[in-house]
Image (spheres, rainbow, N blue to C red):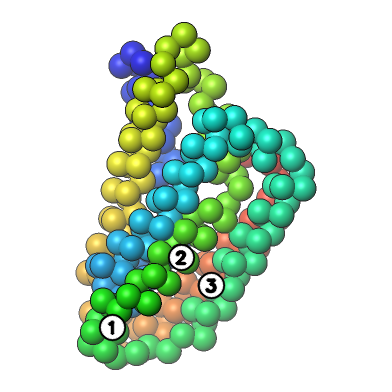
Amino acid sequence: MDINTWVMYFLSVLVLTASPGPSALFCMTRAVSTGTLGGFIAALGSLIAITLILTLSFTGLGVLIATSELAFTLVKYLGAVYLIYLGVQSFRSKADNLAKVEANSSNKRLLTDNFIQGFIVGASNPKAIVFFTALFPQFINPNGSLLSQYSIFAITFILLELSWLMFYVVLGVKSSNWLYRNNRMRLFNKLTGSVFISAGTLLSLSNRNY
């Protein structure tokens, strides 16, 4: 892969990863309630899910999903339902004492839940499959080593995606003390709940065109 091709790919992925979405919001909310470690575990779950989508798209399996109306619709509605579920949970959340939440942030079950939920949120958007399926043909050199090209594509994406997710984790941690004062956490829960429900609703109305 020549440097010009990589730069164009880098810029394309930078735009994709820099755009805040459900995964970024989820990681930030987990960081607010469970600290840096909890936010990182949520980010790791989301990153693994999206990297699997990238791999499927690169190998061509993503084409089958992207062109299958049934598969696309199934993933779309499952993702939409889960995002709406997260939104309802946010609305129902109570502003716990920050010290108590931080004390529980190392709980293995809590961290496992963060990972699983992060994975589901990361995998919940079938549009990512369509995006990568359309993206890769523009940069793949059929005469070059596919394994080396995949490695470059994957490593570039992982570094950018993890950097942005951790940015939102740090943002959540830094704002947690302020949010837990004067009942601001209740407003934050309602705001994030509204965003999750809106994202789920928009996903349910989306199609394969982007």
Q: Is residue 146 left or right of residue 197?
A: left
Task: Give the spatial CA distance, label 3 vs label 1.
Answer: 20 Å
Q: State the residue in front, 142 or 33.
A: 142
Q: Nearer the viewer, mark 3 or mark 1?
A: 1
Dot in front, 3 or 2: 2
Q: Is residue 163 left or right of residue 48?
A: left
| Residue furthest to the top | 143
Residue corresponding to mark 3: 86
Mark with earlier residue (3, 2): 3
Q: Give the vertical position of 202 relative to 113 (above or below).
A: above
Residue 11 appears in the figure: no
Amino acid marked by disc 3? Leu
Which residue appears at 46% of the width and 85% of the height? Answer: 93
Q: Residues within 10 Å of mark 3 (few under 14, many from 20)?
A: many
**N-terminal-most mark, 2 or 1:** 1
Q: Which residue is mark 1?
A: 104
Quick one: SS at disc 3?
A: helix
Residue 116 numbered mark, or none: 2
Question: Helix, strand or loop at disc 2?
Answer: helix
The crowd level at tag 2 (other Cα within 10 Å; few <14, some 14-19, many 20+) is some
